[in-house]
Amino acid sequence: MPVQSGPLIRNLEQKTSRLFRAITENVRWRNRVSKGVGVRLEIAKTYAERIAKRYLSNGAPALREQKGVRDQYESRWAGLDIRINHGHKKTLEFQGAVFEIAADLFLNWFYVVALAEVIETTKAKRLLEVGSGNGFNLVCLALLFPEISFTGIELTNAGVERANRLRADSVFRRTAIGRLSGFIDRRVSDSTEPINVEFVRGDAGAMSFPSYSFDLVFTVLALEQMNRIKDRVLAEIARVTRGQSVHIEPFLDFNREWFKRLHLGNKDYFRSEISYLRQFSLEPAFSWAGFPDKLHFSSGIVMAEKMNVPAVRV
Ligand SMILES: C[S@@+](CC[C@H](N)C(=O)[O-])C[C@H]1O[C@@H](n2cnc3c(N)ncnc32)[C@H](O)[C@@H]1O
């Protein structure tokens, strides 16, 4: 059934604004501007600093080869404890103003609320996250939807280990339930109940799942890391879903400004238009880009419907 994108987008807008107010009460606003110029100056300054740092100290950017991605995330997920504030400040933009926040994975709360909204709309029952990292998104979603079966596939051992620990972490679970339960009108799991999520180590470009084994497959800033293997990965996603694919990624449609495109190119991040999905029989059904975001580039959510699914499951 085609998605009713109007109500979905209205809900995303309302919930994102409400979540933003709830979790930024104590955030230091660096620059409040009604429109444009101040934010643009801020972006230019941060971007100039980045260019200086990259070209004056590190030389030209490396291509994002899978080996480098794996090494980077093996050490990131081995080191990062999401319950500790690492004090690494990020400068973000939301609705025309710039703010600083020191919480790691701050943006993921917004992504989880958006994914929950999509799940409610599609009624999917078997879900896969490709590039599931430390399991943050899936543990939160499994707490919100106890009746749904969730799987994560992740390249790194450290990510899978961290995700299994997060699944059993009652302090994190209590925090997640406290933060998210107001955004979903249903019973959620308590902090000790077993939840229906498993994490497997594997390569998104060659997944061992049978064709059509999931109702919905999603990625969150994972295609971002896979520009060099995106064709294989999108073909695999299209193969294993029988319903939708959902992507929170920096599609070029959300990055029209030259400095954002330059940044995506420098980083060798995912760079495709939303329409690129059509090459994989994934027909875009809606997109929305109202999340708080980094200054250097923007990510939005895209949902696509899998075309030509046989009536009988193979
Ligand atoms: C930016 S992180 C995002 C993690 C998670 N989706 C989140 O929202 O926090 C990208 C993740 O994709 C994983 N990844 C990169 N290439 C992969 C591949 N070929 N197969 C599976 N996972 C991969 C990385 O190891 C990393 O954990």
Image: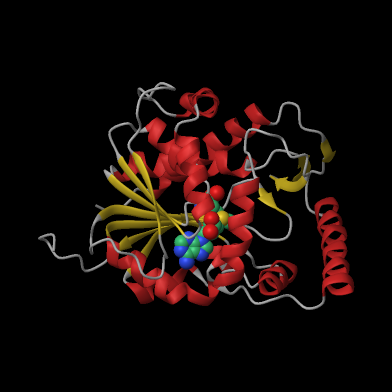
The quadrant of the picture occupied by the C terminus is bottom left
The percent position of residue 54, horizontal first and vertical second, equals: 82, 69
Report the coloring of the rendering.
secondary structure
The percent position of residue 51, horizontal first and vertical second, equals: 84, 69
Total number of numbered discs in the rendering = 0
The percent position of residue 300, horizontal first and vertical second, equals: 55, 55
Residue 249 in sight: yes
Q: Residue at x 57, y 71 (%)?
A: 67
Q: Which residue is drawn at 59% across and 57% down?
A: 73
Q: Which residue lies furthest to the left in this view?
A: 312
Q: Residue at x 51, y 23 (%)?
A: 174
Q: Residue at x 73, y 75 (%)?
A: 61
Which of the pair 193/222 is nearer the observer? 193
Q: Please give left or right for residue 2 compared with residue 32 in the image.
A: left
Q: Is residue 314 above or below residue 126?
A: below
Q: Is residue 81 above or below residue 305?
A: above
Q: Quadrant of residue 101?
A: top right
Residue 271 in sight: no
The percent position of residue 111, horizontal first and vertical second, equals: 52, 44
